[in-house]
Structure formats: C-alpha cells, structure tokens
Image (spheres, grey):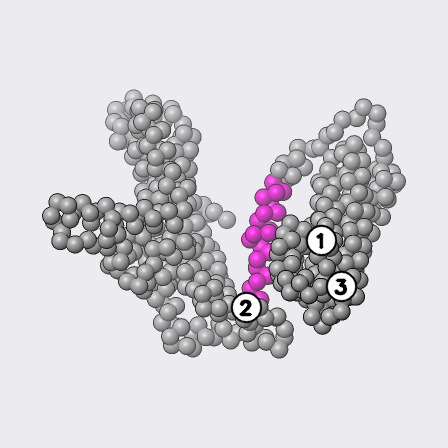
C-alpha cells in the first residue's frame, strides 16, 4: 500500500475526532469546566469561554467569603478559551485536510497545535479544581471534577497523536505546489457553516424534549425518581379545563392560519401588478416602501398601532376635533374581529417581503412567451393571466404547501404584543399558549408535551400536503 493511501486512511479517525470535539463545545452535560456545583448546569464549554459573568453568576457570596478566589475562576475561563481555540483549530484542520498535500500539511500543523493547546488548557482546569478543593468550605462550593474531563483530555491526546502520525505517514508537498481543493469539497465547506447553525439551533434543542417525561420545575435536576412517563400527555386529554384550553387555542391557530392560506395569493398578485409598473423609479419606491415593514419588530408595530388607534391616538383626536365623537375610543381594546385584524396587520407587515420571491420568478419567465402572446393579440391583462400566472404557479404551490405544513406555527410575537384582556380568548394561539404555560406559569413539562404534539401534527400535515400535491399535480416538495 502506498504511503499516500496509508496517510489518507489516517484522516478518517482524525476528522471524526475533530467532529466529536466540536460537538462537545455545545453540550452542557459534558462541560469539563464545571468544576463547582455553583456553576450552572446549563453552561456549555463555549459559554464558559465567552461569558465570564455566566460562568460565575452564582459565586458572588463565595467570592465575598473567600471560599473561591476570583483568580481561580479566571483560570477556568481562560482554560476554557484555550480548549475552545484548540477545538476550533482542529476543526479548521479537518476542513483543510480535504485539499491536496499542501493543504494537508497545514491541516496537520493546525490540528497538532490544537491538540497540544487543548491538552495544556485541560491542565489549567485541573489546577483550578485543585485550588477549589482546598477551600475551607467544600460543602458550600461543591468541588467537582466532571467525568467529561478525562474524555476530553483523551480526545486531545488522540488528536495530537493522530496529527503526528499524519505528519509522518503523509507525503510532503512538492516544491512550488500550490494550495488546491476539489470543487465538491469547496462547495461542501461553503455549506458547512449553515449545516452547523442548523444543528445548533434546530437539532441540538431537541435534547430538551426529555422534560416532557419528567416532573420538572425550573432549577431542579432531572433524575429517574422524577420520571412520570406520559403523565403530561395524558393530561391533555383527561383534564377538562386543559382540554377546553387546547380546543380554544387550536381553533384560534387554525382560523388565523386558514385566513393566511386563503390570502396566500395576495403576494403573488401584488408582485404581478408591481412588475407591470413601467416607471422604474416609482416601482422601486413602491417595492422598498412595502418591504421595509418586514424589518420592523412587532413591538414597534404595536407602538405605531397605539399611536393611531388608542384612546388618545390619531383617529380619536381627529374625530373629536371635528365633533364626530364626544370622547376617544380605544380600538386596540376592542375584542371583536380579532382574527381579521391580526390578518391585516400581518399582511401590512409581510406583503412586500413575501412578494420578492414572486418578483424573482417573474424575471425568470421566458420573454418570448410575452412576445408570442402579443403577436396573438393578447392585451396586458391577458398576458398577466395566461403567461405570468401559469409561470408563477409552481412557486405558489410550493410555498402554499409549506404554509399548510406550518399551519400550527403561526408565530408568537405578534399575538403577544397585541394581546389584552378584551381579546385574549380570540388571540391566544398555540405558540402563545405554550409560552404562557412554560415561561409564565412555570409548567415546563406540560408546555414541552404540547410543543411535541404540535411538531408531530406539523410533520403529518407536511406529508399529507405533499401526497395531495403528488396526486393532483404530479409533483412533490420533499
């Protein structure tokens, strides 16, 4: 077997080690820097490095009493920084190892440096643990040497050993050889940051679903003596008040999502009419003016609504000045037609933004189709109906089916800021209900169970919509 092929095989465990180390950055349960029970259990290795305040948030009394020295915790923090940098160096080396021999040489040196830096930083964690163990009040600070400490130390030692093996086994780059990487690997590395972000923000939080099977309260620890199985799921059906609440919020959710689906053609119609404006400056002004509201937070939208529709707002002041009303009226406290009002506010905020994809689709329609329609005597509206609309229908159906799948995910912030005592029964959607039960009322397991069921229903809706599309149109979106 050639030396190059032998070196290639060594890269497989090296890349696996780099991936495993990178994942450990985000797992609080495997944080080797949690050397005291005063450190929050939800603190990950990455958080320990970038937030000294989070690392020491429960140590104010321990610092004041001298049970823990600030220099000890600073050592922990900077050791965590060194570990993080070592992991990132190893991860960057793993990415570079996809290139030619010159890329791999740099990758080997980076991973070697990362392994050594990480191992040395682990000694800093050990030193800080020894200092905390020597405290006069060990029962107050709870010194801990996490089991993940040895795991991470072994991984860094293995990374160092593998990097040295790669330097020995892999062929040296030829003199004058330039850095090169195949296009498929370059494209993969461009996509990699988005894969990582998806994992961190979409898949890693799924670990929190375990709360639905425990009798958990904020600040408690999860242990098998608090395991309750499907208790919280059964409560959704057995408890009469809970059943009534779920039915009510589902009705609100499906009603407002249904109104959104019924008006989902509006952005397409807006884009079609906007593209027919011949004055370029005016068209750009309208597109910009209607897109800007998307970037305004719902808190500011409510502030605008308050200035216009409150008792002392613009409309009330105007009507009282002209003598039409004897006193101001607060339209925001009116609980009637809540679903329609939320729909209109949502359309005002998102119409221009939602039209962008259709504007891009219109620019991709073959212009010869318009020329042929003109030759056949079609007018402007006939060209819009027979050329533009059919050209946009595939895009519309894909977006429509995705909206059907997300019918239960119609947001939280809009309804949270517009909610008041008059409209709470009509405006409370499923996401707002979960937020109130979990964050406001502290029933985290119950809200987690509701959220899990919502996710299951959303997946079922997605596959149903996909099958309907396949049967009716012969096309699918997944």
Sequence-first tag of 2 and 3: 3
User: Which residue position is annotated with label 1?
Assistant: 74
Quadrant the N terminus occupies:
top right
Kindly tell me whether residue 402 is visible in this rendering.
Answer: yes
Q: Main secondary structure of the magenta part?
A: helix
Q: Is residue 74 left or right of residue 216?
A: right
Quadrant for residue 154, please give it: bottom right
As displayed, is residue 127 above or below residue 381? below
Q: Is residue 261 left or right of residue 314?
A: right
**CA neighbours of label 3 inside 10 A, class few (<14), some (14 to 19), many (20+):** many
As displayed, is residue 314 above or below residue 286? below
421 inside magenta stretch: no
Between marks 2 and 1, how big is the CA–CA gap?
28 Å
Indicate the position of residue 200 as horizontal and vertical percent values.
60, 51
Q: How many marks?
A: 3
User: Which residue position is annotated with label 3?
Assistant: 132
Q: Residue furthest left?
A: 323
Q: Decide which of 449, 333 is in the foreground and name it.
A: 333
User: Which residue position is annotated with label 2?
Assistant: 218
Is disc 1 placed on a helix, strand or loop?
helix
**CA neighbours of label 2 inside 10 A, class few (<14), some (14 to 19), many (20+):** few
- Residue 447 — which label? none
Is disc 3 placed on a helix, strand or loop?
helix
Residue at screen point 80% across, 58% down: 127
Is disc 2 placed on a helix, strand or loop?
loop
Between marks 2 and 3, how big is the CA–CA gap?
27 Å
Between marks 1 and 3, how big is the CA–CA gap?
12 Å
User: Given contact means CB atoms under 8 Å apart, are the residues at marks 1 and 3 in contact?
Assistant: no
Q: Which residues are magenta?
A: 191-213
Residue at screen point 77% across, 45% down: 114
Q: Decide which of 144, 2 is in the foreground and name it.
A: 144
């Amino acid at each position: 077997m050639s030396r190059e092929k032998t070196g290639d095989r060594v890269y497989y465990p090296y890349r696996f080690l780099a991936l495993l180390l990178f994942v450990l950055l985000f797992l609080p349960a495997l944080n080797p820097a949690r050397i005291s029970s005063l450190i929050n259990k939800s603190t990950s290795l990455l958080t320990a490095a970038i937030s000294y305040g989070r690392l020491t948030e429960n140590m104010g009394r321990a610092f004041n009493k001298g049970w823990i020295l600030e220099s000890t915790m600073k050592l922990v923090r900077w050791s965590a920084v060194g570990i993080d940098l070592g992991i990132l160096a190893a991860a960057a080396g793993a990415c570079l190892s996809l290139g030619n021999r010159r890329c791999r040489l740099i990758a080997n040196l980076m991973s070697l440096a990362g392994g050594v830096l990480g191992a040395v930083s682990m000694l800093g964690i050990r030193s800080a643990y020894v200092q905390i163990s020597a405290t006069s009040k060990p029962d107050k600070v709870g010194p801990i040497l996490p089991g993940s400490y040895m795991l991470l130390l072994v991984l860094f030692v293995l990374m160092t050993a593998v990097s040295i093996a790669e330097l020995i086994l892999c062929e040296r780059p030829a003199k004058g050889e330039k850095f090169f990487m195949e296009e498929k690997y370059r494209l993969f590395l461009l996509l990699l940051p988005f894969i990582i972000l998806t994992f961190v923000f979409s898949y890693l939080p799924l670990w929190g679903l375990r709360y639905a099977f425990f009798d958990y309260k904020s600040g408690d620890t999860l242990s098998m003596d608090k395991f309750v199985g499907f208790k919280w799921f059964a409560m959704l059906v057995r408890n009469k008040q809970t059943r009534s609440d779920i039915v009510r919020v589902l009705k609100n959710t499906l009603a407002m999502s249904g109104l959104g689906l019924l008006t989902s053609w509006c952005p397409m119609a807006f884009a079609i009419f906007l593209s027919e404006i011949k004055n370029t400056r005016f068209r750009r002004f309208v597109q910009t003016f209607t897109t800007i509201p998307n970037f305004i937070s719902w808190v500011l939208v409510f502030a605008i609504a308050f200035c216009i529709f409150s008792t002392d707002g613009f409309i009330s002041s105007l009507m009282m000045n002209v003598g039409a009303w004897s006193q101001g009226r607060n339209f925001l406290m009116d609980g009637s037609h809540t679903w329609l009002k939320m729909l209109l506010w949502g359309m005002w905020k998102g119409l221009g933004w939602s039209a962008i994809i259709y504007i891009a689709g219109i620019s991709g329609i073959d212009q010869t189709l318009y020329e042929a329609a003109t030759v056949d005597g079609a007018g402007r509206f006939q060209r819009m109906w027979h050329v533009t609309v059919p050209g946009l229908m595939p895009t519309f159906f894909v977006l429509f089916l995705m909206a059907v799948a997300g019918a239960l995910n119609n947001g939280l912030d809009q309804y949270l800021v517009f909610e008041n005592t008059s409209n709470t029964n009509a405006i409370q959607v499923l996401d707002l209900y979960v937020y109130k039960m979990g964050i406001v009322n502290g029933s985290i397991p119950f809200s987690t169970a509701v959220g899990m069921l919502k996710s299951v229903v959303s997946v079922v809706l997605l596959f149903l919509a996909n099958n309907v599309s396949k049967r009716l149109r012969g096309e699918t979106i997944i």
